[in-house]
Image: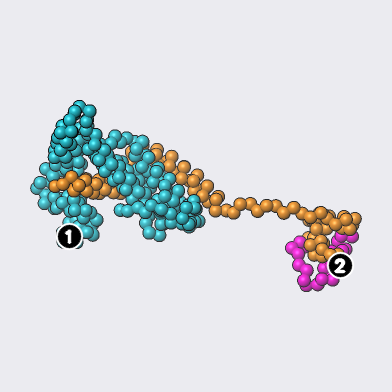
Amino acid sequence: MTVTFGQTEGSGGSPFVPSEEWIEAFEAQANEALYERVRRYARVRSRLVAYGGRVVDDLYIDELVQDAIDDTFAGVLAWDPARVTLDRHLMGAIHSRTRHDYVHALNFRKERIDLGKRSTLAEVETALERTRGDPEAGATERVLAELRGLAVKDPDVIEMLRLFGEQVIKKDEIVRETGWNTKRYQATRKRMLRLVERIPSEVRASALARQ
Amino acid sequence: MTKDKNVEILDAIHQEAALEAAAEGKSTPEDREFARGVSKRVQARLAELRRNLVPAVAPVAKAAPIRPSLLALGRDALLAKLDELTRRLGSSVQYAHRNLEGLSDDDLRRLIDTLDPTD
């Protein structure tokens, strides 16, 4: 899912002025049920950011949704009603933002080593190397290790996770890569999501707490 | 497996889980309360955008002063003059008022002035 940053209407630099058709399309799709859907989406995406090491709460979730809407009205996030539905557009914006916040949080955590206790360059380098080499250093690794353990007897789920790692993510791509039919893809996806829910809460909690 | 790949995997898992939550999940009371608030704000914003589409109100043109020659005429004289003008100018004269009783004396004066500013 990608989101275009920029203005669809008006000329460069001028304030975004949506057309009557744009306003009508927004009005026709925007309702409380849509905002609830988008907030449910944002809540799950925010967990990813938490695994990166950032503290997330309800305010952050609300901010994700509200910013996506505000940026759309401002023309910062271009929405073309003819190309994509409003909820998919907003989810795309939240996807991009949470992905960015997750990676940013991960990178920040790597740099957050307490260098103050290390007096020599050699000690600093050792500390950095230990962090890089430790497979258990991050929540991401701990949660995935748990997930792979749960999926060990399910080769299709393991294959789906491998493909995700190769950035083969969309249904069409996975089906093409594996030769699965749609039914097998859907079933594998459902089982994978159930396994995610089965990751013990203490593993998730400890993963987050050890950031 | 490299850390970069793990990042991709966790991102993709959360994308699938988030789409599932959006499509099939149940809203919490907080979701509903948030949605109500957003809905109100969005409605106000859409109304503002719609207002911005309407051109600004055109400035009101100030009427020119009525000629003293017309000011001197009473209602009967004005009606007679209008009748005479209509006959003289023939089919080139068209005005929207069928019932002249609804027009004030000054309305009649301005109508006459519009039909024949040189008179």
* Front residue of B42 and A103: A103
Residue at the far top: name it: A117
The image shows residue A159, relative to residue B33, as above or below, that is below
The answer to if A133 sits in the magenta stretch is no
Q: Which residue is mark 2?
A: B84
Q: Residue at x 47, y 52 (%)?
A: A13
Q: Residue at x 37, y 40 (%)?
A: A63
Residue A151: horizontal and vertical position, in percent?
13, 46
> Residue A177, labelled with which disc?
1
* Numbered disc 1: secondary structure: helix
Report the chain holding disc 2: B
The amino acid sitting under disc 1 is Glu
The image shows residue B87, relative to residue B34, as above or below, that is below
A52 relative to A133 in the view: left or right: right
Q: Which residue range is magenta in the image?
A: B75-98
The reply to whether dot 2 and dot 1 touch (C-beta < 8 Å) is: no
